[in-house]
Amino acid sequence: MSQAPDRDIPADQPALGRFPTAYTILFLLVILMAVLTWVIPAGEYTRTPNDALGRDVPVPGTYQLVEASPQNLFHVLMAPVAGFYDPASYEANAIDVSLFVLIVGGFLGVVTATGAITTGVASAMRKMQGREKWMIPIMMALFAAGGTTYGMAEETLAFYVLLIPILIAAGYDALTGVAVIMLGAGVGVIGSTINPFSTAIASDAAGIPFTQGMGLRFAILGLCWITAVLFVMRYAERVRRDPSLSLVADMKAANEAHFLQRAPQAEATALTPLQIVILLLFAGTFVVMVWGVSSQDWWMAEMSALFLGSSLVIGTLAWLGEKQFTTAFVNGARDLLGVALVIGLARGIVIIMDQGRITDTFLYTFEGWIAGMSDIAFVNALFGVEALMSFLVPSTSGLAVLSMPILAPLSDFAGVSRDLAVTAFQTAIGITNLVAPTYAVVVGGLAIGRVPYNRWLRFVWPLLLIFSLISMALLSAAVML
């Protein structure tokens, strides 16, 4: 997967290294939770089987104090390991999810090696030249499709140097190009439907199939996409008519010189019949995944097998050869190794809390906070909490396995279905990750597009407010249904 370059970064662009990585943050949280087991009273709820979830759930009003079990340094060091596999706590294991992430990474690596995705987007851009106004909704639809299906993020960095020169030549500015790509993929993540790294992992942590609540997520995806397209097209048309209205007007000459002189030659780019077949297989894999989960009781093992099989089929059709196939698969898995490690580390936090017997104490505290709170107020409060937490833990998968084990049972107390908790999580972190300075995709995209961070904030904040209102309104409506 693409990496953010370290050249041509505007002077007021924030440095990524000024903020700790997700690994450091999560390990510090492991330590913090271990310390809290010495301070916070230990307690437990009575649990009862829930047929719908297939697991035991806490019964509201049954919390009672129990003997403390403080965690020491050995427990802290064991927590990340136990987060992957702990025979005493199967529900907290992350090995199946982490393996699934690695195999999906290998699958994406193989598809990327065929050039089908890159060529498909470049070909669509070539065909739209001369009709640049309509390139905006079409490109944003393609990037949104990538975001909602497989969490397209780092992969977008390759398209900035292709799209921005075309839009500048058509009379728009560099900010328009950045917005088309970043908001397009970002809207897809906000409205994740089958995104393995957001919806699937969060649903797994919440103990529900990721197909639950898909209708609401499609509604969020559609409304946010339409809003983003109208927002970007309005800005782009204003800039075309009066370039002085551009938020990067003072950089116009420099950006034109930079992008138009370096514009890649994408005119000859066209999808081959084989690449078309590969794209159909790529899309079909996700369709089969939804079918398997919704009607065949598939979960992580079966989905992993599906993506592995699709990788083999696509690699054979593309005739990559044994060496190129294995290299592409391993490199793709390696790109997502960090995600797999984050999942295990985040679940290590849950292990420490469970072993220290303070998880239910947190639930009891939150139960007191939501007492008397309406279900609509609760789901919106949940959205706000996840948005704030995503600044602290910028990893989508890491925050999913960190927050869902606590917030999903809390939703039971409030009478809110767990799929709404998952949707509140993914919309909140999707919105936050459009501006988080700790998110490499934001920093990298703005660097390539030569758009200062403060001007991106000035451009995008009204849209983020609208996204939040749309998400909160639809979550509220879903509660009432």
Image (cartoon, rainbow, N blue to C red):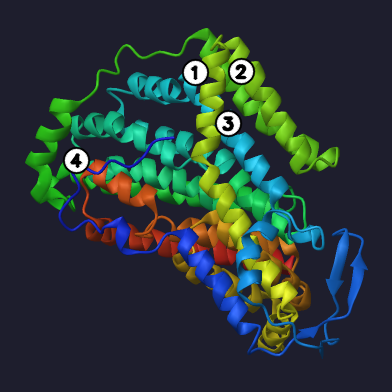
Which numbered circle lies on residue 64?
Answer: none
| Residue 407 shows in this picture | no
Q: What residue type is disc 1 on?
A: Thr
Q: Mark 3 points at which residue?
A: 106
CB atoms at circles 1 and 2 under 8 Å apart?
Answer: yes
Compare marks 3 and 1 and give the one earlier in the sequence.
3
Q: Name the residue under label 4.
A: 240
Compare marks 2 and 4 and give the one earlier in the sequence.
4
- Which of the two marks, 2 or 3, is nearer to us in this view? 3
Residue at the image point whose x is 30% and y is 18% from the top: 266
CB atoms at circles 2 and 4 under 8 Å apart?
Answer: no
* Residue nearest the observer in this picture, 447 or 423: 447
Identify the element where label 1 is drawn. helix
* Side of 347 where 113 appears, left or right: left
Q: In which quadrant is the C terminus drawn?
A: bottom right
Residue at the image point whose x is 58% and y is 39% from the top: 149
* Cα–Cα span, label 4 and label 1: 37 Å
Asked where in the image residue 239 lies, by quadrant, the reply is: top left
- Where residue 300 appears, as percent x and y from the top left, is 74, 43
